Image (tube, rainbow, N blue to C red):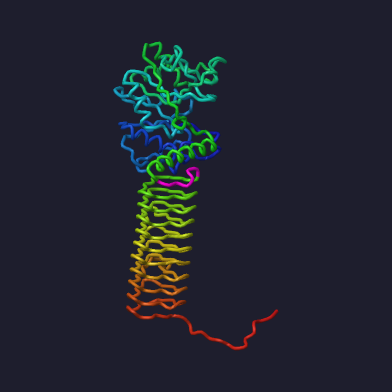
Amino acid sequence: MAAGKGTRMKSKLPKVLHPLAGRPLIHHVLGTASALGARSAVLVTGHGAEAVEAACAPDRVAGNRFALRFVRQEPQLGTGHAVQQAVPVLPDDGMVVVLSGDVPLTGVQTLHRLIALCAGSKLALLTLALPDPSGYGRIVRAGQGSEAPVQRIVEQKDASTEQLLIREIYSGIMALPTRLLKGWLARLDNHNAQKEYYLTDIVKFAVADGVAVLAHKITDPVQVAGVNSPLQLAELERGFQQRLAVQLMEQGVRIVDPARFDVRGSLQCGQDVAIDVNCVFEGAVTLGDDVAIGANCVIANATIAAGAVIHPFTHIDGEKAGVTVGEGAMVGPFARLRPGAVLGAQVHVGNFVEVKNSTLAKGAKANHLAYLGDATVGERVNFGAGSITANYDGAHKHRTVIEADVHVGSNCVLIAPLTLGAGGTVGGGSTITKDTPPGALSVARGRQSTIAGWKRPAK
């Protein structure tokens, strides 16, 4: 169900499209449905339907393995009314699991247990006991104890004073046979305080029809936490990141402070990886054995090989092309690696150095204040401070080839297309526009002049 406006978010963006861990809330829910092995999914949209449906197109949601259909709920007349819109496209022979588009972190194993409890013939509800159940529908059981069958769900605004004391709440998630759901949906009415069609009213229909209503009661509130405000979104973000940090630390990753750690995609770590504070990982990132990540780094779509050190304040963003950092390489501080950067083993890329669509072979160094764009750099090259490859002529990109053992002095401009021959040297301050031969010294700068006794102009 993804039709709600999310008024408390105070945003033009539909609520279910707000990001959690770098992905829209609804993508998390669809990912869970896919992991369950669902053969199809029906997304009920309403507010911002066009944007939500576009964001959930097959090419926008990674890993979906089911047919996805959209239905509209216009106007929004309650949760029961939302599910009624899906009735025409639900096959009678299946089981329905009702999920909420703003409840993104329900565990797959939890839902498998709920489905097992349903067993194709019962109504199974996911419930939780909360210290403060305000705002949630209360679970009213036919007797005392957690094993007693569920008799009904009472919404907050319709609950009596006694029922408001009940701490067990309905999460909004249920599993039941489609054929029973369709019959019960047809019997819904809006005779309640909010004048809405409550999906929860099907519980009393199940009881009346002699169908068992069972509850799978969990203890982890993060799994059923919804998002209705920026504050709740932030709280859920920290809950997600905390769980992921714990998983990684249980695998041996050293995270200095789990409260200052963010993954907005996937992070795979080898043995003895160390991650300092305030690091953000986006897209797909792989860290090899013994990799050390300094504080305040942002790393996206990159593979970092064993023993590499990423010093503080480094920004790596591979986008679609990716970035590769070789074994034992050192990057940063304050370095930037852009898409297509490939650093070989033992490469050094230092402070305020930017590398884009370039390959640096084993042992190459660019330690200070440099730009390497569209370049092929050989082994053991030393690229001086303040030097750049001028790769763009205003219309096209051109490549610079720097062969092995070249030394480029400080403050040089290499105007591509260009090849510097192996073992050559470029004198500092040179602007090189032609290929240079191997082993040669190439200097291209104006002759220095000195005027003795010169006086600066005075006001």
Residue extending farthest left: 93
Depth check, front residue: 343 or 62: 343
Q: Quadrant of residue 117?
A: top left
- Residue 136 location (% of width, % of height): 51, 24
Q: In this picture, is 423 found above or below 76?
A: below
Depth check, front residue: 306 or 53: 306
- Residue 374 location (% of width, % of height): 37, 65
**Is residue 310 highlighted in magenta?**
no
- Residue 197 location (% of width, % of height): 47, 21
Q: Quadrant of the C terminus?
A: bottom right
From the viewer's perspective, is 76 left or right of 346?
right
Q: Is residue 420 visible?
A: yes
- Residue 358 location (% of width, % of height): 37, 63
Q: Is residue 158 visible?
A: no
Residue plotted at (41% across, 66% down): 372
Q: In this picture, is 99 found above or below 324?
A: above
Q: Quadrant of residue 443?
A: bottom left
Depth check, front residue: 200 or 190: 200
The magenta span reads: 253-259
Residue plotted at (32% across, 34% down): 67
Residue plotted at (44% across, 26% down): 172
